[in-house]
Amino acid sequence: MLLLYQTGYEVGRYVSLEKVIEETKEQYYETLEQSSVGWHEGEHNLLPWIDYFLVMLLKSYQRFEERVGQTSDSTRQKGWKAKKVQDVINHMIADFTINDIQERCPGISRPTIQRILNELGQDNLIECISRGRNARWKKR
């Protein structure tokens, strides 16, 4: 993080790089293993780790861009919260939780997100696959 800050990459101030790494931890460990083969002999290859690091940095900037979104008058228009939540859901690859949406939609309350999820469920655009405190949804 310090090296990123010192070189002008400040995305870590706004997006948790640790969370991005956690979400891709299997790939992270595979990359570390690939990069460390031949370490003691001085014949290791850093390219797999560098590729992973750059992809992780790109994902962080994409997440930051999702969070910032459009900062113009679009946030004052009626229905902007529902549109933002729908946009986030449309970009989800796998199933998701309210926390996943909250992280990508700062300023939109949990009850509002829940209401929008209920409306999308009634419209058969998403499906609740697990209920309760850690409820999960998926796109249809």
Image: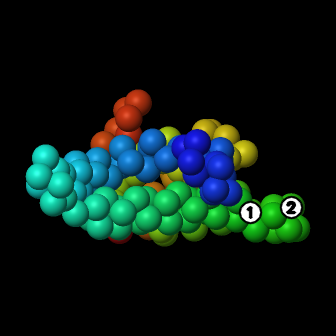
Residue 31 position, x and y percent, is 23, 57
Question: Who's the residue at 41% across and 30% down the image?
Answer: 133
Position in image of residue 129 (x %, y %): 30, 49
Q: Is residue 81 left or right of residue 126?
A: right
Asked if residue 49 can be seen in this view, the reply is: yes
Rendered-image quadrant of the N terminus:
top right
Give residue 110's position: percent from left, percent from top.
Answer: 61, 39
The one nearer the camera, 11 or 8, is: 8
Tell me residue 96's x, y (percent): 40, 51
Mark 2 surroundings within 10 Å by alpha-carbon count, few (fewer than 14), some (14 through 19), many (20 or more): few
Give, as a three-letter code, the residue at label 1: Trp
Say which amino acid is labelled 2: Arg
Q: Quadrant of the C terminus?
A: bottom left
- Residue 112 shows in the view: no
Residue at the spot of label 2: 76
- The disc label shown at residue 55, or none: none
Question: At 62% across and 39% down in the image, what residue appears?
Answer: 111
Which residue is more in the foreground, 44 or 91?
44
Q: Secondary structure at mark 1?
A: helix
Q: How far, Cα to Cα, is label 2 from label 1?
A: 7 Å
Residue neighbourhood size for the residue with mark 1, other residues' Cα within 10 Å, grouped as few (<14), some (14–19), many (≥20): few
How many numbered discs sit on the rendered protein?
2
**Is there a contact, CB below 8 Å, between mark 2 and mark 1?**
yes
Which residue lies at the image location 29% right of the left edge and 67% below the top edge? Answer: 47
Residue to which mark 1 is pinned: 80
On screen, residue 62 versus residue 37, left or right, reads: right
